[in-house]
Amino acid sequence: MQTLQQQRYQLLQPHLRGAQLLAQQLLQCQSSAEDCLHDALISAFTTKGFPETAKVKAWFLQVVRFRSLDLLRQRKKLTTLDAISTLEEVVNTPLPAESNALKALSLLPFAQSDVLVLRELNDCSYAEIATIMQIPQGTVMSRLARAREALRLQLQQLERGEQAND
């Protein structure tokens, strides 16, 4: 007989990599993302409000997103943004880049990268993104369209920069 935690882990396991990508994109630091994911798992294992199976993905990504935002707020309180940037440049371990796509994604404003990570890297539906971000579904669609266009432009800029360096 499985314990409650084992049952929950089985439901969450398919979403762990996507959740880590979300946290890493938001926090721009692999170790912070791992800490965030760990905290989210503890919440999932101990909460009395664990969702039904069909809603686990959106619920868990929402928990990870909120925890990431909490960590960002804590950083802001503890130090200035300039000091954060300097520190992250020193300790940051970025995702392995197969192309300029991840670099371009990291250069986008938070609101745009957030929705793209949920849709493209986590394969969330518009309804799931609306739940996670607590915004209307129509807003998700318009933000996603603008984010895709901004990503396309950012990729073009990066490619032009690489061609100039060749």
Image (cartoon, rainbow, N blue to C red):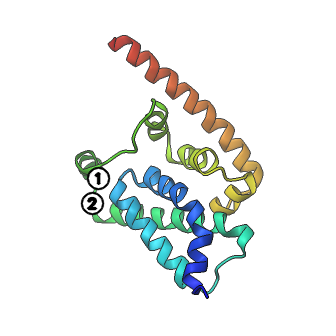
- Compared across the picture, whether 95 is left or right of 52 comes to left
60 w.r.t. 8: above or below: above
Q: Position of residue 116 (x, y in %)?
A: 59, 44
82 w.r.t. 23: above or below: above
Q: Quadrant of residue 131?
A: bottom right
Seen at 56% across and 74% down, the residue is 9
The image shows a total of numbered marks equal to 2
Looking at the rendered image, the quarter that the C terminus falls into is top left
- Compared across the picture, whether 17 is left or right of 135 comes to left
Instruction: Give the label on residue 100, or none.
Output: none
Q: Marks 1 and 2: in contact by CB < 8 Å?
A: yes
Amino acid type, residue under disc 1 in the picture: Ile
Secondary structure, mark 2, is loop
Q: Which residue, given by chain and number where applicable, does mark 1 sit on? A: 84
Seen at 64% across and 36% down, the residue is 146
Seen at 72% across and 49% down, the residue is 139
Inspect this view and state whether residue 6 appears: yes
Q: Nearer the viewer, residue 80 or 130?
A: 130
Task: Compare marks 2 and 1 and give the one earlier in the sequence.
Answer: 2
Q: Position of residue 119 (x, y in %)?
A: 64, 47
Amino acid type, residue under disc 2 in the picture: Thr
Q: Position of residue 7 (x, y in %)?
A: 61, 79
Query: What's the CA distance linking mark 2 and mark 1?
Result: 7 Å
For mark 1, does the 10 Å Cα neighbourhood hold few (<14), some (14 to 19), or many (20 or more) residues?
some
Q: Which residue, given by chain and number where applicable, does mark 2 sit on? A: 79
Inspect this view and state whether residue 70 appears: no
Looking at the rendered image, the quarter that the N terminus falls into is bottom right
Secondary structure, mark 1, is helix
Nearer the camera: disc 2 or disc 1: 1
For mark 2, does the 10 Å Cα neighbourhood hold few (<14), some (14 to 19), or many (20 or more) residues?
few
